[in-house]
Amino acid sequence: MDLPRNVPPGEPIETDVVIIGAGPVGLFAVFELGLLDIKCHLIDILDKIGGQCAELYPEKPIYDIPGLPVVTGQELTDRLLEQVKPFNPTFHLNERVDELARQADGRFLLKTDIGREFVCKVVVIGAGGGSFTPKRPPLEGIEAYEGASVHYSVRRMEDFRGKDVLIVGGGDSALDWTLSLQPIANSLTLLHRRDDFRAAPHSVEKMRELVASGQMRLMIGQMTSMDGCEGKLEGVTVKTKEGEERISINAVLPFFGLTMKLGPIANWGLNLEENLIPVDTEKFETSEPGIFAIGDINTYPGKLKLILSGFHEAALMAQQAHRYIYPGKKLLFQYTTSSSNLQKKLGVK
């Protein structure tokens, strides 16, 4: 799919809706709004479309998307992009919304960190948990190896084929990638500070079977230093209860979790509850009329942080957004399976 290029900063961009966040839920919101003839621009702080799915686990399988028994984060992103193609949304990547204010005419003015301005009638916050950054191991000089030998996510599994890999952590991400990369790595070592794991029990069991059969190594301890040359890692020193040991590796995957920050959202005058945005469950509207929050960024009684929940929230949000975009115009609910009008919008014969 040919994606619209970033529009250069200049005069304020006027549109119906600005969606903050281009993850799966933000993308599906484009579809639901598009069916109602509502135009969207999307802004995301990441350099790619797909949110956390594309950034953190593009090749990791997802099993709870309705109708798709298994799909990777990148595949889901690609399918959603294909679905919204008829509505031609515009994406603004590598940008952060710093300011949001209501204007005298009732519309919203948004400003990004590169000086771009938007004017719209509706704002949809679909920013996941806010901006997120991986937690960095507290090792001196680790920055020199980041991107070349130290990776905080797996973009392409093939990048690790034939390498000596060290995975650090004890949660689901660490164990999932241990099991996924072990068959293609030259060698794989899993390092955790204790012999007790937070991951799914069946993953831990499979890992221990691989260790018992000599197909990988498990170390209990902590990294104390790294050595290498010009960004290429050659080895890591690990401290265990037996003492220090240097192991030869050329790729490290530390899974220490993410630091989630609301960032400028915290300064937009919205009611907040433990860094989440409370919404109603009829429209998924915030305390500020015309501003909606969908996906992991919102909270309400019974909230489940699932992609499919965000899809449901996007559908109901669009119904209310129509009232702001087309005040006084009656909204006729239609099904895509039977409406020739909707099928024409989608390019279906």
Image (cartoon, rainbow, N blue to C red):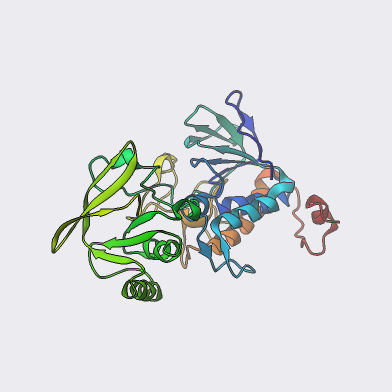
Q: Is 124 above or below relative to 106? A: below
Image coords of residue 196 (percent x, y): 26, 70
Question: Is 86 or 69 nearer to us in this picture?
Answer: 69
Q: Residue at x 58, y 66 (%)?
A: 65
Question: Is 262 or 290 nearer to us in this picture?
Answer: 262
Question: Is 271 or 225 nearer to us in this picture?
Answer: 225
Horizontal side of 176 relative to 339 (left or right) equals left
Image coords of residue 310 (percent x, y): 55, 59
Q: Please state, as top left, top right, bottom left or bottom right, where the C terminus lies in the image.
A: bottom right
Q: Residue at x 58, y 67 (%)?
A: 70
Question: Quadrant of the rendered structure where residue 348 is?
Answer: bottom right
Image coords of residue 234 (percent x, y): 30, 46
Q: Residue at x 50, y 54 (%)?
A: 158
Image coords of residue 190 (percent x, y): 31, 62
Horizontal side of 104 relative to 334 (left or right) equals left
- The residue lying furthest to the top in this view is 10
- Using the rendered image of the protein, determine whether residue 56 is visible from the camera's viewpoint: yes
- Using the rendered image of the protein, determine whether residue 37 is visible from the camera's viewpoint: no
Q: Residue at x 77, y 61 (%)?
A: 336
Q: How many marks?
A: 0
Q: Please state, as top left, top right, bottom left or bottom right, where the N terminus lies in the image.
A: top right
Horizontal side of 189 relative to 282 (left or right) equals left
